[in-house]
Image (cartoon, coloured by chain):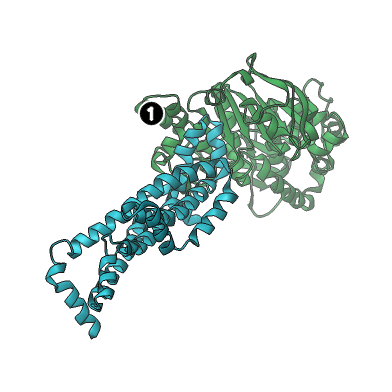
Chain colours: A cyan, B green
Amino acid sequence: MNWLNWLSDFFSAPDHRSGPDSIVHRVSEHLLLSGEALLYAALLAVPLGLLIGYTGRGVTAVTALAGAARALPTLGLVTLAVLLAGVGDTAVLIPLVALAAPPLLVAAVEGVRGTDPDVRDAARGIGLTHPQVLWQVCLPSSAPTLLAGFRTATVQVIATATVAAYVGLGGLGRYVIDGLATRQYAVTVGGALLVVLLAVGAQLFFTLLARFALPPGVRAQRRAR
Amino acid sequence: MITFEGAGKRHPDGTIAVEGLDLEVPTGRITVLVGPSGCGKTTLLRMVNRMVEPTSGRVLLDGTDVAQLEPAKLRRGIGYVIQQAGLFPHRKVIDNIATVPYLLGWDRKEARARAAELLELVGLAPETAKRYPFQLSGGQQQRVGVARALAADPPVLLMDEPFSAVDPVVRAGLQEELLRLQSELHKTVLFVTHDIEEAVRLGDQVVVLREHGRIAQLADPHTLLTTPADDGVAAFLGRDRGLRGLGLRPASAVALRPVGDGLRYGGWELALDDAGRPIGWIDRTAVSAELHPAAGFRPETDTLRTALDAVVLSPAGVAVALDGDGRATGTASRDAILAALTPTGATAVGGIDANADESSDTNVGTGPDANAGAKADAKTTVSTRKALAADGTGEAGTTDRVGGPEGSDGGR
């Protein structure tokens, strides 16, 4: 019963209804920060991954690197980034991008490499240029794998974006850290719950996207495998 | 015309795929490259559209070295069909077919109209246009592959084992369809297969290859079957090549006995229905009026092999000639069929009767199986009849034309 009381305290507190510490504001801060990190990670990792997957050059290096990158301690990276770039968005974005890029990179590489070699051969054979094969054939074929990569990256980034509060920035991490600091556990629990809800929501969003937004041919092909 | 001039391919690791081949692929004809796997036939085919670059010699397309042409542009002017069809899974059938027109910058509407035309040409229903490749059977996918290759009306068609991945019945239908298309379109076709049966069926010219792309024999199918260059080629052609050669010759060569001249052959009489369609053979010596199945052939479209098959299947030893509606237009006795089996160019052995079996055998050069068939004497009726019918049905699957032009490959 304690739990429910805490939650109702959290959601009914006037500060959480409006103003800079309001739930709406914190959630939007959190989502903006996560979105920004994902955008940079995608711009960096997807084109590189598509190219590596298409040429088949450097696949081993990428896989090894991506595995190693997963072992990076985010909190340590944040500290390092603050030391290098000072307190600010950049200090948080660097570790978040480092977190999101590896799954995206691996997804892009594997997606392109998963294209049916007969389809690629036929595409070349009927006169598509390399960029056309990559864009018109490999990219649509890798859409399901890419989406799965985005799902993983998004969930991780949303869950981890709480570290922004650690260096004094906004987002849902504020509730968690402030709640702990002031021993207002209702705030901590409320903040944590919101993070979980966002992460689960993102997971659901990508699952639905994969189910309904992919071209039917690609979807069926995946199911068949 | 495609010309190979000493075209060879040596892999970077030193292994030789093709030693250096000289070959002319004549315009408007089907040339089949056939040989065991690893003989370099696919490598040779891929040299034409620069999917493989020769390491020696060159390949000319109507006198122009293909190495001088920009690969993507060259390929858009050459139809390309591969074994697994290689259709784009995310595109509807209609857009798959229109791929090359799109690449050539056609207006979208125009390209789709052309694609719809081709869909019909390859014998697929119009509603197939909106489907995705995974919703089609293997045979239907292959038809779409052929349609895609023909979309921009290229003069040259490269086909790399296009029908190898489908079951024999569907394959026969696709082969039939290709021959029909070719009789309308007259493309320069280079066709690769490991199936000698397919090679002699489709080729105007058949090139039998050995390892490293060496030519073992280059001939038209009839010559290939009757006079293989050496034991190796003969072995590759397999047994019954004389009998199979009959599948290349039209049944119209058989002299028919008109229906009006009577339907009795010895103890047998052919029964017709009111429309003139055969119902069966009646044994006049038997007490019961039991009907025995009457096997027939269509002189206009069938081959001598089908006619011979019909004779073998018939209890009376007589094949019934049928018109398009299944009406009997005449009958052909065993003797009449045997007379037509005599190879073209030679005069028929005089007074062929049942006893002349041996002489006609040697002329046609048939194998032991055919001997058994020809020795089926009218006197030995009942007992041999069953054995022969069993033989005959075994053969029928491979010889008979299966699948209509409407593309009855079955559903999904």
Classify mark 1: helix, strand or loop.
helix
Left or right of B315 in this view: B94: left
Q: Quadrant of residue B17?
A: top right
Which residue is rendered at x = 50% and y = 57% of the image? A69
Left or right of B246 in this view: A113: left
Q: In which quarter of the image is residue B129?
A: top left
Q: Mark 1 lies on which chain?
A: B
In the displayed structure, B106 sits above or below B314; it is above
Left or right of B312 in this view: B84: left
Q: Which of A116 and B95 is in front in this view?
A: A116
**Residue B85 seen from this side:** no
Q: Nearer the viewer, residue B127 or A16?
A: A16
Residue A188 point in image, percent of width and height = 27, 74
Q: In which quarter of the image is residue B58?
A: top right
Label 1 crowd (10 A; few <14 / some 14-19 / many >=20): some
**Residue A153 seen from this side:** yes
Which residue is rendered at x = 13% and y = 66% of the image? A17
Where's the N terminus of chain A, which quadrant? bottom left
Residue type, mark 1 in image: Ala
Residue A101 point in image, percent of width and height = 44, 52
In the displayed structure, A5 sits above or below B165; it is below
- Residue to which mark 1 is pinned: B113
In the displayed structure, A177 sits above or below B241; it is below
Residue A28 point in image, percent of width and height = 23, 57
How many numbered discs sit on the rendered protein? 1
Residue B321 point in image, percent of width and height = 63, 34
